[in-house]
Amino acid sequence: MYNLFISHSWTYSDQYKRLVSLLDQKLRFCYKNYSVPENNPIHNASSTTALKLAIKEQIRPASCVLILAGVYSTYSKWINIEIELAKDMNKKIIAIQPWGSERTSTIVKEAADIIVAWNADSIVRAIREICN
């Protein structure tokens, strides 16, 4: 069982949902998703500090952090904070290049321990390799 925190922006939730679907369909691969659900009250935290602490608690039990490396990630304050939190907690980061993306986030790729293609086999192989 792998405990995963999948970083995402709800503005780009379709990619997040496709990634979760890819992982769900992978045979002989079990994981628990510690990502912040769209309907979680964390989104209504009273301050930036409260939200950061709440995200930190979501990341804490994760074996590793998966980040979609779309160019939008470069401009996301929260993805940058999630990278910072993951690094502070010594969590491995897997950058996933979104399928069909010509441009990707340099910030995410530089923070990553490994960069993989948008492919279930590649993603799961990376998780098994660095999240043990």
Image (cartoon, grey):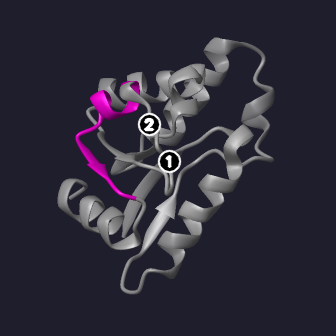
Q: Is residue 117 visible?
A: yes
- Choose top left, top right, bottom left or bottom right for residue 76: top right
Question: Which residue type does callout 1 highlight?
Answer: Ser
Q: Which residue type does callout 2 highlight? A: Thr
Picture coordinates of residue 27 (x, y %)? 41, 86
Q: Secondary structure at mark 2?
A: loop
The tag on residue 104 is 2
Instruction: Answer with left or right where residue 60 lies relative to residue 54.
Output: left
Which residue is at the front of the view, 78 or 54?
78
Residue that appears at 28% across and 28% down? 110
Tell me the tag on residue 101: 1
Along the horizontal axis of the image, is 106 left or right of 40? Answer: left
What range of the chain is rendered magenta? 107-117
Q: Is residue 79 above or below residue 62?
A: above
Q: Residue at x 76, y 32 (%)?
A: 43
User: What residue lies at 60% left-to-right and 64% top-to-bottom?
Assistant: 18
Position of the C terminus by quadrant: bottom left
Helix, strand or loop at disc 1?
Answer: loop
Rendered residue at 69%/49% (across/down): 13
Callouts 1 and 2 close, C-beta under 8 Å: yes
Residue 103 point in image, percent of width and height: 46, 37
Quarter of the image holding residue 91? Answer: top left
- Determine the CA span between mark 1 and mark 2: 7 Å
- Rendering coords of residue 69 (x, y %): 45, 40
Query: Considering the image in quadrants, where does the N terminus appear?
Result: bottom left
Q: Which mark is residue 19?
A: none
Q: Callout 2: few (<14), some (14-19), or many (20+) C-alpha neighbours within 10 Å?
A: some
**Horizontal and vertical percent for residue 17?**
65, 60
The residue closer to the viewer here, 6 or 58, is 6
**Is residue 27 in the magenta section?**
no
